[in-house]
């Protein structure tokens, strides 16, 4: 056979859409450990479809030989006729329907076909039940539901999807303290993630990881640990850790007689295109450091999926993820990682629990698809997810109370936020209804994108009115907290009120009222997690409080830096001191010191200071509203699906350059049209 | 550790109920081949839950060490506290909740624990989502749905469930014909099933299997084939067939230079307890031969699951299986195989198609649970299946037409039977409504067994009335065929009419009318498959036509024997001759010559001649109504859950002995009470 037969076109591995993520998600989520013990999630872990049919009707001008690669046991048919098994098959000249049925329990069924003109790619279709039955006369009947296949960039027969892995790079500690004759503490200089390696290990060492020095040295309480040994024995399985770990410090105790040379690590990371990244620099060096550490926090948590905390949690969490997506649109624009995470979080039908078992997280999941569509314009993905959006919304609607409100049932986790003040989570929370309303709006908008007739628009409007009528206090100019056992809980928190602003429930006048009565009111309990700080600061930005937000960023994120943070934390309470900062969940090192939701300055600075935002899907149209706040100058890039928008601003001038789309630059009262690749300078 | 620690109690492997069957079912169904090509089913193949938690609260009077074996990666916790991974764990004195979470993509997560008093067994519980979340203060919340685990007789740590296999026994051909210098035809004497083996093979042979001599010799059209080679090469992978095959004849062609010695096979079978089997002997030797061949047909098709046809189909089919179950209650009483098959056929939620995509097969699936409960009294299994019964019935009810009738949608297969006469399958078939009504009745009865309040009783009564009002012709004394496009199709077939008798839709008078107007009416098209003959002859027996049924059995099954059958066929048309008998589905050897539904004499002779039938679940009460028909004498055993009922009858005497339960013997007008282990002789 002619070698040229291959490589003239671009074949790629294909699978049932979403199945790669379901499978990879289990591996990802099950890597979590607690003091050495495996710690899988407490929600249902799904499986890929174990038997999948792939099909495409092809047209060839001459007989063509194809080579078939598959992960799984498979068959191959031409026009419904099964062929004798062979990895080389001959397709006759003409129009033919090719079908392959592949079975694989352990990893998703996938195929890769290459021929002169025929190959697998995104144009193929897949089904998990072809429903094709043959009657007693040999006549075929029936038809299954076929959907476009999933694919990514597995473009070689030698790299099937099940071999997927992140990149690695060897790194060395920056210093080592000898603690005793048989123990040392290694410092890798900053928070990192990967696989510890010990050169020339002879014997057994006990390894204690720490995000802090205190944690690594506290053998009894550090969250992650390891035993390495050479030769391999029952407790230690070699000279490198088998699973990745998050740490800055590594404390190593050697058993008697053990020797080893260098201690180093393989840093593990998701590669990104440096030419297609967000950047930010300004006149305030502290803010630059904050942006850098936030970006590094994002890079550590952007992996096979968006991870929340790299040390402990290591699961995909919908509420964390939606923030990662938004930050990511202003940092690496890794749309694939967004899609993977959205697919993975949703998993398979039947829906037996809220996403991550958390009601709010279900609602964020919907909203994240709307965000994704706005930033990428990727309608195909909305189409792919639509059936699973419908069944998840069916689940939500099937659990509404008699008033049509989303009220937590005993097995629902109502999260909202980690709070330090007493806050009831029973009954009908206004916060949850606002998120529910946004989820319903998302359904309506996505249906419109897909030209599907539904009644989600009517439902979302009804819900919006009901929320206002039920929870809004005209007296206090605020949304009350909840209805519990039929009685209004008049507690006022920032949560529902800021989401009334953010998710468009409140119109102009009401927003201003909320700002005064709640968001800027010192009597309202403060928010202490970076998680909800994200939304709080965004609401402040939306309402024009850019100076205040910069101050808050410097206080809060600057505060973490002053505490020595090299990545941003799960929670930060400025009044705490010393090791108090490390504790959470009743455990001395329970707090995650690298938590995705800590990276929000990346988002805030890109969206509300550089001021870049798409106004039509995929940046077909966008606006730039640069705002200096108290800065002297700032400059940065915001990635778009296939390009970059560059913004420079100082006290007299704004310069912008966009490499795709069309937009509007707003400076003062001036509105200037922006065309792709035309630099605009405005002096004001 | 003391060796005695083990083996003082009876530990066994456990798993999430139904998951062993889902996994094994995929292996089973995917073994089907067509001319060497793999041929998986065209319906959804499910996966086991990949991550399962097992739990039990145990009480120990002293500290106890346990040994843990698992299929999958797992963790172990005591009272919610994760333990450092080790296959030996120490359980402190007192009451403790043990939990293990196990992850396994490829095979079902299973565990086996043995200690002095603590071990895994059927008293453990399992869940696929424990929903147990920890709040910021380290306090656990939430709870999943736990169900009793699945288990069988995997009672040794060395035989985990994933190693399950049937028994094998070496067998030799009875003769060999030399066909040419390099080819021979081996005859194994009768239909068989297993793995061909060739001793001292050097080279490559091409193997063509045949249920008939004609098929084996027809290299281009035989349904199954193989290539064996030693040393292993790309086409042949050794000196024994890798997958089991059904055949009587094997035609072998050797490639030039190939040598081999003996050709033999490993017969593969499900073992059964000979002391707990149905038997039948009578004064008619032909009938004895029919019973023997029927029993052999059942033994060939009773495997990991009940299989329909061992050569070609090799899938689990609900309509075939319900007959196998009934035959099995009178032959091997393999209740485990019934349970496995029922679980496997149902698979997992969501329901996306009818069972096997066939509407009638969904309804039989329900009915089979009622039958199972009647014969075994196993309420635990009804409880296990109940949630999946509900979701399958939800699926059925979600597809009813406006009149509340089960009308086929385009992707539903309406099977009824293979028929040789024109019969419409569109619209609302009376046959399907009668089955649907029985399914609804099954829901009502099972709900009653489980003390669950439902409205299935009301629904089934409504449906029963609607069927009568809609389809019964007072004029023709028969149920019409269907409503098509609003118009009654007045075609009268045996199908709905015999099910009106069998499934209790018709009361006494109507049954007699149906007998005359349909069942005994020569103008009604005859039934030609053993599949529907099963029901036809049962209806005749129910109505007292025992002589006629014996004649039919001699004609029809005796006819197959006279054609040389060594197992019973998928279909038999007495008017066909020679190779016509082998063809089906437009293929010369498409017909299955060993098809479970061909074995119905085993059922008919046990139930309607020996006359044994449970009247309360699990033979707690039973009746014996022996009927000789035209026989001089008959004798046999009918297995009960834990025993045997022996019946002897000749023209003057009846003798019965039951080893469990209490029953009533009906001879003529006499009704005699039967107590366990007391032989009763009645002279009449």
Image (tube, coloured by chain):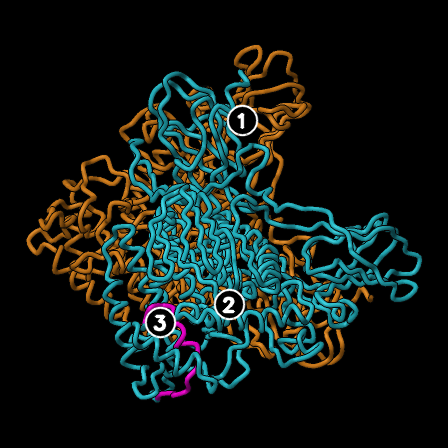
Chain colours: A orange, B cyan
Q: Check the image and report above or below for B297 versus A492.
A: below
Q: Are marks 2 and 1 on the same chain?
A: no
Q: Which quadrant would the N terminus of chain A be assigned to in this image? A: bottom right
Q: Check the image and report above or below for B659 versus B589.
A: above
Camera-nearest residue between B600 and A668? B600
Residue A10 in view (yes/no): no
Label 1: how many Cα within 10 Å (few below 14, some 14–19, many 20+): many
Q: Along the horizontal axis of the image, is B188 left or right of A424?
A: right
- Magenta stretch bounds: B488-505
Ranked by sequence position, the earlier of labels 2 and 3 is: 3
Label 1 or label 3, whichever lies nearer to me, is: 3
Q: CA distance from mark 1 to mark 3?
A: 55 Å
Label 2 or label 3, whichever lies nearer to me, is: 2
Label 2: how many Cα within 10 Å (few below 14, some 14–19, many 20+): some
Disc marking residue A226: 1
Residue A587, image x, y percentages: 35, 26
């Amino acid at each position: 056979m002619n070698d040229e037969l291959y490589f003239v076109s671009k074949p790629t591995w294909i699978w049932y859409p979403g199945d790669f993520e379901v499978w990879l998600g289990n591996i990802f989520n099950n890597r979590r450990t607690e003091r050495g013990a495996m710690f899988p999630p407490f929600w249902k872990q799904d499986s890929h479809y174990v038997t999948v049919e792939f099909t495409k009707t092809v047209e060839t001008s001459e007989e063509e030989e194809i080579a078939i690669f598959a992960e799984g046991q498979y068959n191959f048919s031409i026009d419904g006729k099964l062929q004798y098994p062979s990895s080389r098959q001959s397709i006759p000249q003409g129009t033919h329907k090719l079908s392959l049925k592949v079975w694989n329990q352990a990893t998703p069924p996938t195929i890769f076909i290459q021929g002169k003109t025929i190959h697998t790619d995104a144009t193929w279709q897949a089904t998990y039940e072809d429903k094709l039955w043959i009657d007693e006369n040999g006549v075929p009947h029936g038809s299954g539901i076929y959907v476009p296949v999933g694919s990514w960039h597995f473009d070689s027969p030698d790299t099937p999807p099940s071999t997927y892995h992140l990149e690695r790079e060897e790194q060395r500690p920056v210093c080592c303290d000898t603690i005793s004759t048989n123990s040392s503490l290694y410092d890798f200089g900053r928070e990192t993630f990967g696989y510890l390696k010990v050169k020339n290990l002879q014997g057994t060492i006990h390894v204690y990881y720490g995000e802090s020095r205190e944690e690594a040295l506290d053998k009894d309480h550090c969250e992650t640990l390891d035993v390495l040994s050479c030769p391999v024995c029952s407790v230690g399985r070699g000279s490198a850790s088998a699973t990745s770990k998050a740490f800055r410090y590594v404390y190593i105790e050697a058993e008697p007689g053990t020797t080893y040379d260098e201690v180093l690590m393989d840093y593990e990371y998701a590669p990104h295109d440096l030419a297609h990244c967000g950047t930010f620099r300004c006149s305030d060096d502290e803010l630059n450091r904050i942006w850098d550490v936030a970006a590094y926090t994002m890079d550590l948590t952007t992996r096979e999926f968006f991870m929340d905390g790299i040390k402990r949690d290591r699961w995909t969490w919908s509420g964390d993820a939606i923030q990662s997506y938004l930050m990511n649109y202003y940092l690496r624009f890794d749309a694939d990682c967004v899609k993977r995470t959205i697919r993975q979080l949703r998993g398979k039908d039947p829906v037996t629990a809220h996403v991550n078992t958390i009601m709010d997280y279900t609602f964020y999941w919907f909203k994240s698809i709307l965000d994704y569509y706005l930033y990428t314009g990727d309608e195909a993905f909305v189409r792919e997810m639509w059936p699973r959006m419908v069944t998840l919304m069916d689940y939500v609607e099937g659990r509404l109370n008699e008033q049509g409100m989303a009220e937590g049932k005993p097995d629902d986790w109502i999260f909202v936020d980690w709070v330090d003040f007493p806050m009831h989570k029973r009954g009908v929370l206004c916060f949850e209804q606002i998120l529910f309303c946004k989820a319903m709006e998302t359904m309506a908008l996505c249906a419109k994108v897909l030209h599907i007739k539904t009644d989600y628009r009517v439902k979302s409007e009804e819900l919006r009115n009901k929320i206002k009528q039920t929870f809004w206090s005209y007296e206090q100019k605020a949304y009350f907290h909840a209805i519990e056992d039929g009685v209004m809980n008049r507690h006022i928190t920032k949560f529902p009120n800021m989401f009334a602003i953010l998710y468009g429930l409140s119109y102009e006048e009401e927003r201003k009222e909320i700002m005064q009565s709640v968001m800027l009111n010192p009597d309202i309990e403060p928010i202490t997690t970076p998680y909800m700080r994200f939304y709080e600061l965004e609401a402040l930005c939306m309402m024009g409080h850019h100076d205040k937000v910069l101050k808050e960023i410097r206080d809060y994120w600057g505060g973490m830096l002053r505490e020595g943070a090299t990545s941003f934390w799960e929670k930060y309470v400025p009044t705490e001191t010393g090791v108090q900062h490390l504790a959470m969940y009743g455990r001395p090192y329970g707090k995650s010191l690298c938590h995705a939701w800590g990276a929000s300055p990346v988002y805030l600075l890109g969206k509300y200071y550089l001021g870049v935002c798409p106004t039509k899907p995929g940046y077909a149209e966008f606006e730039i509203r640069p705002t200096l706040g108290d800065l002297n100058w700032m400059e940065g890039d915001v990635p778009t699906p296939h390009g970059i928008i560059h913004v420079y601003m100082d006290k007299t001038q704004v310069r912008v350059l966009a490499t795709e789309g069309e937009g509007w630059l707003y400076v003062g009262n001036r509105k200037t049209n922006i065309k792709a690749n035309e630099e605009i300078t405005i002096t004001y």
